[in-house]
Amino acid sequence: MSRQQPCRTDSFAQNYPRMNYTRRKQVNVAAGLVTALLLFMTTTHAQQPAVYLTLQEATDSTLANNQDLGLSRLDEKIASAKTKEMDAIYLPQADFSFTALSSNNPLNAFGFKMQQQVVQQKDFNPDLLNNPGASGDYSGRLQVKQPLLNMDLVYMRKAVAAQEGIYQLKTKRTAEYLAYEVKKAYLQLQLVYEAEKVLKEALRSANAMYTFTNNRVQEGLMQKSDALNVKVWIHTVETNLAETSSNIRNASDYLSLLMGRPYGTVYTAEPVQPENNEPATVAVPDNRADFAAMKKAMEASKLMIQSAEKSYLPRINAFAAYQVNDYRLTGFGAGSYLAGLQLSWDIFKGNSTKNKINTRQTELRKLAGQLANQQAQSQLELNKTNRQLEDARYKIRQQTAAIDNAAEALRILQDRYEQGLVNSTDVLQAQTQLSQQQLGKAQAVFSLNSTAAYIHYLTSTQKN
C-alpha cells in the first residue's frame, strides 16, 4: 500500500515549518505589505482633514437649514392658510346637487308633477290623487350664497390675520435665538482649540524636560524619581489632550446639528478675538420680536372681543337657486328659480355671548400681565449679564498679568532646575500653574464673547 499523503485541509501553522527559507521569506514579505496597507488605510480614514468654518458660514447655514426654524416657518404657512380660509366671508359659495326620488305618497306624487310642469285635468281625479302609484322625480339643483353683512365674521377674520403676524414674529425670534446659539457653539469650539493649543505647548515643554532629566539621570547627576515625575506629568497632559480631541468632535457635532448637516465632520474655527468694547446697553427695547408677538396676541384678543360683541348685530346674506325636474334621468322638462335676501338675528343665546366676551377680556388681562412680567425678567437678565460682561473684562486683564508672572516663575525655576538647585516637582507645579492661567484666560475670553452675544440677543429690536 502506498504511503498516505497529507490532507490538503491541514492548517497553515502545521505546514509552515516544512516550507523552505525562500518560501517563508516571501510569505513574511507579503504579510508585511498587507499589514502596512491596512495600517495606511486605517490611518488615512482616522485622520480625515478638518473643515475650516467661519462664524458667518455657520450662521448662514443654520438660518437656511435648521429644522426648528423650518418648523416655525411651517407654522407661518399654516396661519396664512387659515387667514385665506376666512376669505369665505366675502366670496360667494356655490353647490350643485342631483337627486333621484320615487314615492307613492299622494302629496309627494302630485308635487313631483307640479315641479315637472306636467299636471293635467285628469290628475285631479280623486282616485288618482289618493292612490297615485309610484311616481319618480329627477332633479338637479344649483345654489349660490353670497355673504353681504356679517360683522362678527369680519372681526374674526382680522383676529385670524393677526395670528399670522404672531407666527411671523415668533419665526424672527427663533432665528435670533439660533443665531445666538450657533455663535455660542462656535465660541465653544474656539475655546476647545485654545485648550488644545495650551496642552500641546505644555506637552512639548514636558517632553523637553523629560529628555533633559533622563540624560542627567543616565549621567548620574539627577535622581530617577525626577524623570518619573516628569513622565507622570506627560501622561496626564496626554490624557487631557485626548479628552480635548473628543470635545472638539462633540462641539463639531453640535454645530452640524444646528446647521442641519450630517454628524461626523470636524471643524476648525477662526482665531479667538475678544469682542464688545462698546458701552453696555442698559435697557431692553420694547419692540423686541417676542414682545411684539405678545402685543400682536393682545391685538388679536381685542379683535375677538369685538367679534363677539358684533354677534349681537343681525346678519344679512343673499341666496339664489335654480332647479330642473323631470320624470326621466336625463330629462330637463321644467326649470324654476328661487332668489332672496335673508336677515337673521340671534336675539338671545342664553348669555353665551356675554360670557364669551368676559372670557376674552380676562384672557386679554392675562396677556398684558405676561408681557409686563416677561419685560421685567428680561431687564433683570440684562442687568445681570452687563455685570458679567464687566467681570469677564476684568478677569481677562487679571489672567493676562497672571500669565506673565507664571511664565517668568517657570523660566526661573527651569534655570534653577538645570543647575540642580530645585527638584522636578517645583518645575512641574510652575508648569501646571502657567497652563491653568492660560486656560483661565481662554475661558475668560469665551465668557466675554458669549456674554456679549447674549446681550445682543436680549437687546435685538424688531424692525418695522
Image (cartoon, grey):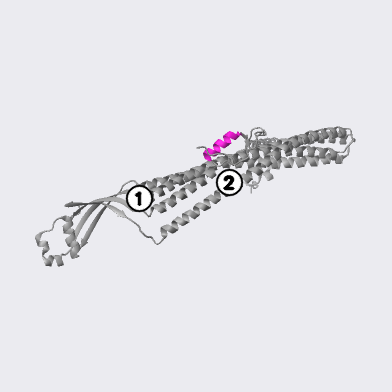
Q: Which mark is residue 375?
A: 2
What residue would you read off at disc 1? Answer: 150
Q: Is residue 318 left or right of residue 170?
A: left
Q: Amino acid at mark 1?
A: Asn
- Classify residue 249 by image quadrant: top right
Residue sitting at 82 percent across and 35 percent down? 410
Q: Residues within 10 Å of mark 2 (few under 14, many from 20)?
A: some
Is 62 in the magenta? yes
Q: Work out whether 14 lies above or below 363.
A: above
Range covered by the magenta-colored residues: 52-65
Q: Classify mark 1: residues with Cα within 10 Å, few (<14), some (14-19) or many (20+).
A: some
Q: Element at badge 1?
A: loop
Q: Quadrant of residue 393?
A: top right
Q: Position of residue 95 (x, y in %)?
A: 29, 50
Looking at this view, is 21 or 401 the one in front? 401
On the image, the x and y values in percent for residue 80 come to 43, 44
Q: Residue at x 58, y 36 (%)?
A: 58
Residue 48 against residue 330 in the figure, above or below: above
**Circle 2/circle 1 CB separation < 8 Å:** no
Q: Amino acid at mark 2?
A: Gln
